[in-house]
Image (cartoon, helix red, strand yellow):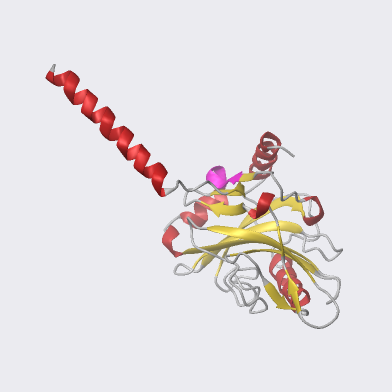
Amino acid sequence: MNFKLNALVAAALLAAAGSANAAIDPGLNGNGEIWFAVYDTVAQKSFSFDTGVYMNDFVGTGVNYNYNFGSDANWTTFTAGSNSANWLWMVGAESGNGLTTSRVFTTDNAATVAIPKGGPGAMSANGAIFTSAQIAGTNYTVNGSAVKVVGDSGYFGDPTMTGNWGTKFSPDASTTVGNSLNFFSITGASGLGNVNGVKFGAVATDVWTLSSAGVLNYGAAAPVPEADTYALMLAGLGLVGFMARRRLAA
């Protein structure tokens, strides 16, 4: 799936947005849909979005997924009277087939993650509670968005989620606007010890980002210029300014 195709898919999804419930498949059959959720920690309201991409179909290497919520009526409702400085957001998905076969996708701030072996099952169960609360019946064909306020069933800020999968995930799966998040696949395993998350992304550089304008993107992180690059840029600008002054003097 290339970038243009992803853009078309995103446009189709957003055209269907604005429904009261986001039809997020919680993966009870072992293959859930990837969702995005953000909540305002002060206004205590949340926005969730069903990407329409299933776990088994997600391609995490050299592929961009881009969603622009600018035309989403629910995003407009969420952002009204809201300060983006107070937002926490994450991306996830779950499939629940028991402690040994449960699987979750989760964002995280860290470069690596490791959790107790029973963790994926507990995370998947809590994730299914979060997503099932936003489903209109069992219809997973209409992918859209939802706005919830504190006290609503499916509110992202309730104890079920809030970025740590209901305390079942000790690392921090959420972050503020302007920061990026790594993406991991974690599968339950038998035996002793921890379960390690497998990092998605080409050469482990692909990340999720969210802008205050409501653009969610998964892809390669933008390179940060080295110090010597900045020095060359400044020197070049200084030289251009010097030449411009000489021409004016002439």
Q: Closer to the camera, 122 or 193?
A: 193
Q: Closer to the camera, 8 or 102?
A: 102
**Quarter where residue 140 is shown:** bottom right
Identify the image quadrant of the N terminus.
top right
As drawn, 87 above or below 13: below
As drawn, 42 above or below 183: below
Can the viewer see residue 183? yes
The residue lying furthest to the top in this view is 250
**Quarter where residue 64 is shown:** top right
Can the viewer see residue 147? no
- Residue at 40% x, 45% y is 228
- Residue at 67% x, 37% y is 3
Identify the image quadrant of the C terminus.
top left
- Residue at 61% x, 54% y is 207
Residue 235 picture location, percent across and down: 31, 37
Residue 76 picture location, percent across and down: 50, 50
- Residue at 65% x, 39% y is 11
What residue range appears in magenta?
67-72
